[in-house]
Amino acid sequence: MRLTPRDWEKISGIALIVGPAQFVIETLVEGALIPGYGLVKNWISDLGAPPNDHAHFAPGTELWWAFSVSLIVMAILVFVGLVGLKPILWRNALGKAVLGLVAIVAIGSIGVAVFNEVFYLPLHAASALTAFGLGWVALVTFGIYIRKQPGWSPAWSILSILGGIASFTALILFAIPTRLGSANSPEWIAAIFPGGSERAIVVPLVLWLIALGARLLWGLPRLDVATGAAAPAAVP
């Protein structure tokens, strides 16, 4: 049976919810299994570090591969989610930019998973910078774009832009000790580096993706051909 646009919306909605959710669960579970691992004091990517004796990295765990698999699964499911979002994002250049930005963030996430920090640090750092550096831009761009789309409440625009600003602020807080070193940074900034500020960059993007997934499951607004206004969403 051929899938209808509404079928794709449901599939994409589930993908956008399951992908980020399973990644969050995996990181929390694996972090709890590593002695001494802290959500604030340790890098997220320490979870994907193979066992090693390098002073810069966490000792690593035999479960390091689970982090990489979970991150790749999330990226793939985000791509599936973009299929359902395409009808609203492909209407003009701004919407297409959102689609492209999220796709690049997903590719960056795959790079983080494939190139672990222990053996491929330069490629790992470049991949992480791609994901971190563009995620907040996607949120802000979507917030600007969606405010002119019929059938979407103003809250979507406001919250998306605020989420992008929060992620960008966290990126700055992360960049300061990365550039200057924790010893040369304000104490309160150093106190949340690297894990706290790094997670603060990611959380708005994760919540935004899950919210979009829920919106797809609920049903995207349909445009009335005669009036151009938003018609009631399709009934699941």
Image (spheres, helix red, strand yellow):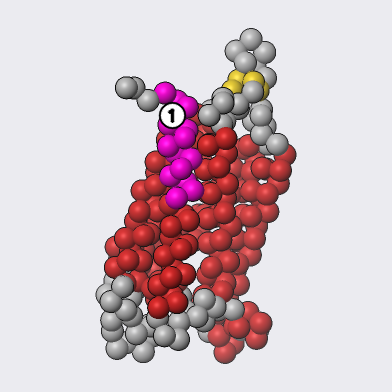
Binning the other alpha carbons within 10 Å of mark 1 as few (below 14), some (14 to 19) or many (20 upward) gives some
Q: Mark 1 falls on what kind of element?
A: helix
The residue segment tinted magenta is 4-18
The foreground one among 214 and 74 is 214
What is the x, y in percent for residue 193?
Answer: 55, 79
Residue under label 1 = 7
What is the x, y in percent for residue 227?
Answer: 67, 13
Q: Is 9 covered by the magenta stretch?
A: yes
For image coordinates 53% across by 49% down, the residue present is 210
Query: Which quadrant is the N terminus positioned in?
Result: top left
As shown in the figure, which amino acid type bears the numbered disc 1? Answer: Asp
Q: Is residue 111 above or below residue 121?
A: above
What is the x, y in percent for residue 146?
Answer: 63, 37
In the image, 105: left or right of 229? left
Q: Residue furthest top?
A: 226
Q: Is residue 188 above or below residue 96?
A: below
